[in-house]
Amino acid sequence: MSQSKSQPPKELPTNNAQKVSTLGGFIAGGVAACGAVTFTNPIELIKTRMQLQGELSKTQKNQPKLYKNPIQAFGLIYKHEGLRGLQQGLICGYFYQLGLNGCRIGLYEPSRYWLSKIFNPSSIMDNGFIKQNLLINVVAGGISGSAGAVLASPFFLIKTRMQSFSKTGAVGQQTYYHGTWDGLRQVYRHEGFKGLYRGVDAAVLRTGAGSSAQLPVYNLTKSFLLKNKLVKDNSFLLHFISASMAGLGVAIVMNPWDVVLTRMYNQKGNLYKGPIDCFKKTIKIEGPMALYKGFWAQLFRVGPHSILTLIFMEHCMNAMIKIEHKLGFNPVY
């Protein structure tokens, strides 16, 4: 019996992201990331402070570190600032995640579709499903991630400054904001619209690198596990293993640019002319390994954040499929 065109071939795993509209993917991705950041915001705060610690200091090796490792940092911040201190910048983080991951997840499949249509049309099946292609996946991830970085850049700037601020354990330049909107108002008042997008070039490099790894690694791992029948389709174990591998890939690829981004956003003056200048100065003064400052905090953040985001994404996508089906919507790229 011939394969029905209404069903995807058995060897190709079902991809829920191809069943929703671009808007549906944007909403599902943003909501999933907001759920994840609720749990991972404290380690994001710790990572930010560890990356700023010893900034452009040649004598940092002879100085005692305020934050020695993620666990010690967690205890120190909780002792002096409490749970509220650990969740500093959370609301701003929600706005950031809506913009960033709404684009990164919502625009990934449309980007992959159009790239495949232009460069590899044979990969698009009659039923609309697209075969996995590593190069196209990486480029699609970079495009969708970069778009999210630009859209959400002002919120990341405010979040970084809010998370670095501490009355008891100060690292880096200190800026106090009453909240997200106060931060946006202050930056706009003193630096104008351009100030809101300070460091956006670093954000594009950082998020583009991370996105080029996250969804491609997730989907390729997922396809490998299903193709070799190692786990069941749509199971928690499938999503967990795939998301874990994606988190590891993101942490390795993104950390150097994340250090640059954190420092670019936290500066109030013109310590760095741009991301490349920051990259060079950091290596020259602190050494190459400074680009991997806060790596373990990064891994502890990106790992759980990727796992939670991508698992939540599967549920959010399922919900969006049902909602759009009732409303009569179809994926339109």
Image (cartoon, rainbow, N blue to C red):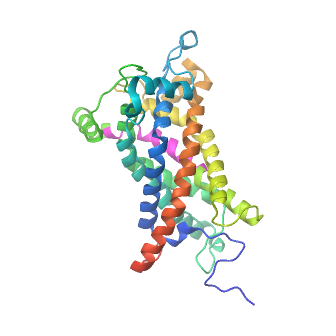
Determine the residue positioned at 59% across, 38% down.
299
Q: Is residue 214 left or right of residue 86?
A: right
Q: Quadrant of residue 190?
A: top left
Q: Is residue 190 left or right of residue 15?
A: left
Determine the residue positioned at 45% across, 33% down.
45
Q: Is residue 217 left or right of residue 331?
A: right
Residues 219 and 323: in front is 323
Above or below residue 159? Residue 127 is below
Pinpoint residue 189: horizontal percent, then vertical percent: 21, 35
Determine the residue positioned at 49% across, 42% down.
40
Q: Is residue 262 left or right of residue 132?
A: left
Q: Tally the marks.
A: 0
Q: Which residue, as the protein is rendered here, is positioned at the far left?
A: 189
Residues 142 and 171: in front is 171
Image quadrant where one finds the N terminus = bottom right
**Residue 205 among magenta residues:** yes
Query: Can residue 209 be seen by looking at this rendering?
Result: no
Magenta: main secondary structure equals: helix
The magenta region covers 196-213
Q: Which residue, as the protein is rendered here, is positioned at the far bottom?
A: 1
Above or below residue 97? Residue 326 is below
Pinpoint residue 321: horizontal percent, then vertical percent: 48, 72
Pinpoint residue 70: horizontal percent, then vertical percent: 55, 29
Pinpoint residue 246: horizontal percent, then vertical percent: 62, 49
Q: Quadrant of residue 127?
A: bottom right
Query: Can residue 199 be seen by looking at this rendering?
Result: yes
